[in-house]
Image (cartoon, rainbow, N blue to C red):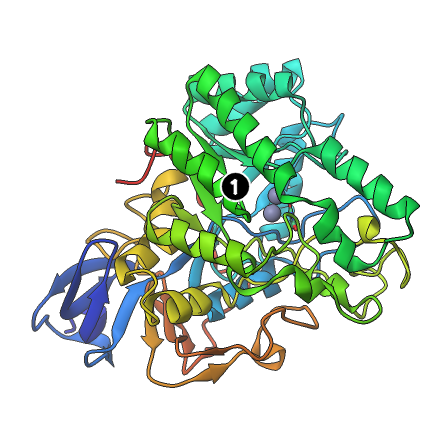
Amino acid sequence: MAEFDLVLRDARIGTASDLFRGDIGVRNGRIAALGDGLGKGAEEIDARGRLVLPGGIDAHCHLDQPTGDGSEMADDFASGTLSALCGGTTTVIPFACQVKGRGLREAVEDYHRRADGKAVIDYAFHLIVADPSAGVLGQELPALIADGYTSFKIYMTYDELKLSDRQILDVLALARRERAMTMVHAENADMIGWLTGQLELAGKTAPKFHAVAHARIAEREATHRAISLAELVDVPVLIVHVSGREAVEHIARAQAQGLRVLAETCPQYLFLTADDLDLPGNEGARCVCSPPPRDKANQQAIWTGLANGTFSVFSSDHAPFRMNDPKGKLVCGPAAPFSRIPNGIPGVETRLALLLSEGVLKGRITLHQFVALTATNPARIYGLAGRKGSIAIGADADLVLWSTDRSVRIANARLHHNVDYTPYEGIEVTAWPDTVIAGGEILVQAGEPTGAAVKGRGRFLRCDRPVEGAPA
Ligand code: DUC
Ligand code: ZN
Ligand code: ZN
């Protein structure tokens, strides 16, 4: 009789701290043994010196999230999680978003209905707190945190989502009391609104002006303010999707002072620039996201922040809208001003390959940093440590066997999302997931989903309180 359900033989196993050669034995969906010459598996994969890393955690992606402008996200939990899986991600944490004037619990229930029976991989939820009323702060949020929704995002911009500084202080105080993690979208709403008004008055409404309206100063100022508010309350805070050099500098300075300020960045700030919004007609809409991509010098600042540890998390911020779809990027018409283009770009499937290829294989970051940024740190920060994000005894057997010896040209035609473009079309990478295993099941083989990658197999994960403060 086989000792294990599955054995990966002679793999080169990488974690946030180690790289070693050995076998991985899987039983009942978990890693049961790591060793040399493990006993037989009912199924065996001959990994023969090939790189095996923990399945990725995409801790910032938007799936089937209701919008307020008539647009619809292209990916529901079925297509979005299949796409994530094929890119080597085995856990996603999208957002249950509160509508102003309504409850948080109702947003969570609605979001569960959207995920139930559809998710291919495991998922947890962050909350978006858009209306921190007395009832939300006093009852709903503490109860939800106790129920396993231990992180939430707040916005400093977007009229329908943004909080005042005073509201942010209230939310941060609650996060401190309840030991939850607060993620902040840091852009100054009035600066963006004022710049947008000026640009529109001058007839400058093409997609490329989105990057002008969302100036780096607006990100810098809001980042500094968010850090200051968290310092006042003495609570950890995580600044999401950081794009500009000055914001990185503020975060690094705060960290050097001993403040528990964490930061996330995303592929668009490494691989795109504002020039990608400067395309004929409305084509630039495809790369409209907030904050916007910057320039080569800022890309370099983000790479430096990844290499020197300023960033702890690398997520996709996948926010999928189609170009050729009346409910997509051009929902407000083909000539709509940039301010009415839905914000967001797809990237859940390409996140890991881009960073492994351009970051690790080109020597910008180490393999251990890659694993930490894409799996181990998000697990610790968002309360999934021990279960997700590492290759360790007892952890879920979420594993990716990477192909790193041939070049792959990114092409939308080979992706599994429901979006009709990828902003990364044509980029050559030398890493692509070959085999992806989640909960001990082989869900991707030779880069394509197997029959086991079925809708509804993904489980909802209740998150623990985050491992306080920061990654080890
Ligand atoms: N910006 C956000 O804040 N959220 C979704 C996508 C985007 O571009
Ligand atoms: Zn955001
Ligand atoms: Zn986002």
Q: Is any atom of residue 435 visible in this view?
A: yes
Residue 218, image quadrant: top right
Task: Determine whether 166 is above or below 47 in the image.
Answer: above
The answer to whether 210 appears left or right of 95 in the picture is right
What type is the residue that disc 1 sits on? Glu
Q: Give residue 452's position: percent from left, percent from top.
A: 45, 72
Residue 279, image quadrant: bottom right
Mark 1 Cα-neighbour bin, 10 Å: few <14, some 14–19, many ≥20: some
Task: Determine whether 10 is above or below 83 in the image.
Answer: below
Q: Nearer the viewer, residue 111 or 164?
A: 164
The structure residue drawn at horizontal position 63% and vertical position 39%, both measured from the top left corner, is: 217
Q: Give residue 136's position: percent from left, percent from top.
A: 62, 20
* Furthest residue toward left: 37
Q: Is any atom of residue 322 visible in this view?
A: no
Q: Which residue carries the number 1 mark?
A: 246
Count the numbered circles shown. Answer: 1
Q: Give residue 83's position: percent from left, percent from top.
A: 54, 67
**Image quarter hosting the N terminus:** bottom left
The structure residue drawn at horizontal position 52% and vertical position 54%, both measured from the top left corner, is: 298
Residue 63, image quadrant: bottom right
**Image quarter hosting the C terminus:** top left
The structure residue drawn at horizontal position 78% and vertical position 58%, both measured from the top left corner, is: 207
* Furthest residue toward bottom: 406
Q: Give residue 363's position: percent from left, percent from top.
A: 31, 67
Secondary-structure class at tag 1: helix
Q: Nearer the viewer, residue 394 or 283?
A: 283
